[in-house]
Structure formats: C-alpha cells, structure tokens
Amino acid sequence: MSDQKSEVKNQRSARMLFTTIYLPNFFLQAATRHQRELCAKPIALIEEHQRKPVIIQLNKDAENAGIRKGMTPSQALARCLRVVIKVRAPMQEKSMQEILLHYAFTLSPFVEDTAPGVCTLQCADCRDWSENVRHVIEQLTECEIRAQAAIAPTSDISFLAAHLARPVLHIENAKEFLAPLPIETLASATATRFSDRF
C-alpha cells in the first residue's frame, strides 16, 4: 500500500510545473500606463525620494539614445533632449501588482507574490496549461500591461525563462535550455530577482 502511495506521489511530482509571469520594466510600466502618447518616445524613470535621483529603468528608445541606468536626469538629457523623465508611481504599481495576482489566481490557487511585477505559480494539472497561460498574458495586454511568462519543471528555471519569453516559453528540458545561455544572461536575471524585491 505504501509503495502505491509513493508511486502516486512520484507521478504527481513528475507532472508538477511552475510558471513565472513577469512584467518587464515594471516600475516604468506603472508610471506610464494609460499614456499611449509616450510609447514612441525615449523614457527614463527615477526614484524621486533618493538624495541624488538616478535612472532606475528605461525603455528601448532611451537605451538606443545612449542613456543608461545610474545616470542622473541631467546626464540623460545631455544624451537626448527628447527623453521624458518620469518618477515612480507607487499607487499605480500597487494596482498593477493586484491585477497581476488576480489573473494569476485564475490559473492556480498556488500563487507566490515573488517580487514587484513577478509572480510564481505551481500547477499539478497540466492539461491545456500553456494555452491557459497564454490567455492570461492576452488578458493582461488588454489591461495595458505588458507581460511574458515561462513554464518549467522548477521555479528558478521558469523565472529565468520568463525574462526571455516572447510572450510565452515552455521549457521541458532544463539542461538543454540552460546549456547555450551566456553567463551574462544568468547573472542579469539573478540580479533582477534580488533587486526587484527592494
């Protein structure tokens, strides 16, 4: 009898999947949500309560203009006069996180509020799971929230893969997924995981 229970437990573990839903540039997204007129402009975000405010997030247009994280607003403007400097919007961040968690719970009752703009789900019933995750990403898009997600055998792999998803990535073999990745990608995702908690 105990052998049968053990076998059932092992079968459940084998089917267990983790999903990370990730909102890239979460703080910047929150500060510019519902402002479509800014989409085509270089944008940089600062934390105004710092003694010396510096850029903490920026969009691709700002990056292409030579602006980098850690620059002051004046340094960013010296690189590109068109850059729009935004400040963090805590209320919008809270609202976006609540929306993210709301849709995450439509997928699974096992949801971890991992970090700002990141949640991790555990799923034991994998039927149509990829399609269901893709549907949630579409629902977030309708809420003007850019999201991407990854499905993997472990939460760490799903977190890493979510940063590379366009918009959903399903990893079945962790070793095959990790092998070709440059060490810079692994280091960047790890740094993001810890820095986004603060």
Image (cartoon, rainbow, N blue to C red):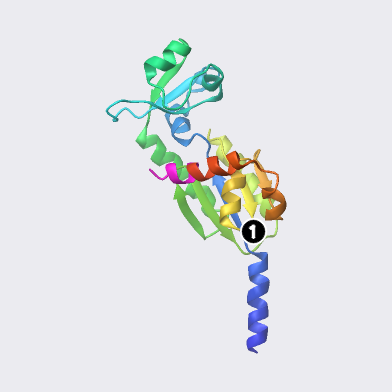
State the extent of the magenta-drawn residues as a range. Answer: 192-198
User: Horizontally, is 44 left or right of 172 in the view?
Assistant: left
x%, y% of residue 129?
Answer: 67, 55
Residue 128's image quarter?
bottom right
Q: Quadrant of the N terminus?
A: bottom right
Using the rendered image of the protein, determine whether residue 154 is visible from the camera's viewpoint: yes
Please name the residue shown 58% across and 47% down the image. 160
User: Horizontally, is 63 left or right of 8 in the view?
Assistant: left
193 in the magenta segment: yes
Residue tagged 1: 153
Using the rendered image of the protein, determine whether residue 163 is visible from the camera's viewpoint: no
x%, y% of residue 93?
Answer: 41, 37
User: Horizontally, is 114 left or right of 122 in the view?
Assistant: left
Please name the residue shown 53% across and 53% down the image. 120
Q: Which of 162 and 173 is in front in this view?
A: 173
Q: In the rendered image of this protein, does residue 12 appear above or below residue 73? A: below
Residue 152's image quarter?
bottom right
Q: In the rendered image of this protein, does residue 169 appear above or below residue 42? A: below
Q: In the rendered image of this protein, does residue 9 appear above or below residue 20? A: below
Q: Nearer the viewer, residue 188 or 82?
A: 188
x%, y% of residue 95?
Answer: 41, 40
